[in-house]
């Protein structure tokens, strides 16, 4: 199968072409606008998609194993059944993405911080899967991950003004917003006269238990991280 070039992909996406099953292994697609692209079952193994816009793209069933997805915009993308094993997803935007049955074992960045909506916390509590101790919660799954909660807001849309700070799709803590002089309301935030629609919730910072250093503990921590990532891909809305 022919290995496509960067130019081939850019032109094809602009023209609405389908790249279903395409071989894009190792391709450099950094900082490209591939929003809405059709990449169902495509092979992106080891591809570099740093700062690339894949918002609304169809990546269902795609192989993204070991792909570089640093700061990649995958807002509202379809990642169902995608293979993200060992992908570098630090800073990736996944707001609104469809992630059911995606494989994320060993993916970097995906479970370092978790945004909890109030709705999700209520659902976990109602189902008996949540233990609250002060500002710390424990998710009562096999891994029993713990998080320290901090109030935060997820920027979902720009209602008026210009998104000069590129905040849409990002999550900011209440303390960060106050420090920046933003006006914070239950469902909106005003930053330098720009009005954003937000979803209020909490940032969950992982709480690591003290453990004796050693390979066994390190291995268990990796396993717990994988279980946690899998849990949230199936449950976070």
Image: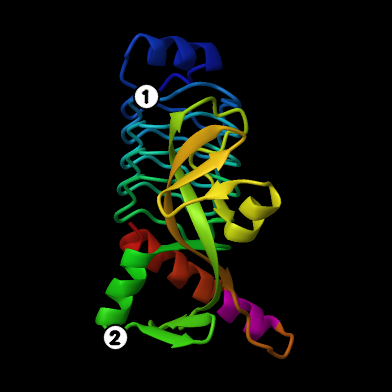
Highlighted magenta segment, given as a residue range: 215-221
Answer with the quarter of the image where residue 112 lies. bottom right
Residue 9 at x, y = what percent?
A: 46, 17
Residue 220 at x, y = what percent?
A: 57, 80
- The label shown at residue 19 is none
Answer with the quarter of the image where residue 57 lies. top left
Which quarter of the rendering shows the C terminus?
A: bottom left
Label 2 vs label 1, nearer the camera: 2
Residue at image x 53%, y 82%? 136
Residue at image x 42%, y 25%? 35
Q: Nearer the viewer, residue 198 or 24?
A: 198
Q: How is the protein colored in the picture? A: rainbow
Q: Which residue is mark 1?
A: 37
Provide the secondary structure element on which disc 2 rests: loop
- Contact (Cβ within 8 Å) of mark 2 with mark 1: no
Q: Which residue is mark 2?
A: 128
The furthest residue to the right: 213
Residue 158 at x, y = what percent?
A: 45, 33
Residue 184 at x, y = what percent?
A: 52, 51
- Please give the count of numbered marks on the rendered protein: 2
Which quarter of the rendering shows the N terminus?
A: top left
Residue at image x 72%, y 85%? 214
Q: Nearer the viewer, residue 232 or 7?
A: 232
Magenta run includes residue 180: no
Magenta stretch mostly in which secondary structure?
helix
231 to 193, vertically: above or below: below
236 to 90, vertically: above or below: below
Q: Is residue 48 in view?
A: no
Measured in 3D between alpha carbons, the distance from the residue under mark 2 to the one under mark 1, in whole angstroms, is 40 Å
Provide the secondary structure element on which disc 1 rests: loop
């Amino acid at each position: 199968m022919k290995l496509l070039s960067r130019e081939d992909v850019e032109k094809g996406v602009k023209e609405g072409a389908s790249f279903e099953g395409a071989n894009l292994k190792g391709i450099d697609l950094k900082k490209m606008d591939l929003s809405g692209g059709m990449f169902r079952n495509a092979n992106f193994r080891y591809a570099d998609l740093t700062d690339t816009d894949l918002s609304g793209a169809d990546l269902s069933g795609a192989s993204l194993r070991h792909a570089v997805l640093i700061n990649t915009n995958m807002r509202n993308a379809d990642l169902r059944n995608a293979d993200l094993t060992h992908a570098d997803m630090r800073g990736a935007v996944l707001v609104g993405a469809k992630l059911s049955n995606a494989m994320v074992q060993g993916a970097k960045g995906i479970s370092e911080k978790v945004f909890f909506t109030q709705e999700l916390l209520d659902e976990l509590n109602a189902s008996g899967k949540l233990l609250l101790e002060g500002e710390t919660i424990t998710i009562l799954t096999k891994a029993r991950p713990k998080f320290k909660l901090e109030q935060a807001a997820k920027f979902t849309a720009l209602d008026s003004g210009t998104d000069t700070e590129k905040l849409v799709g990002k999550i900011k803590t209440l303390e960060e917003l106050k420090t920046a002089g933003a006006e914070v309301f239950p469902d909106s935030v005003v930053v330098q006269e720009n009005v954003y629609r937000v979803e209020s919730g909490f940032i969950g910072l992982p709480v690591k238990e003290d453990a004796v250093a050693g390979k066994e503990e390190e291995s268990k921590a990796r396993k717990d991280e994988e279980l946690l990532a899998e849990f949230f891909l199936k449950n976070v809305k």
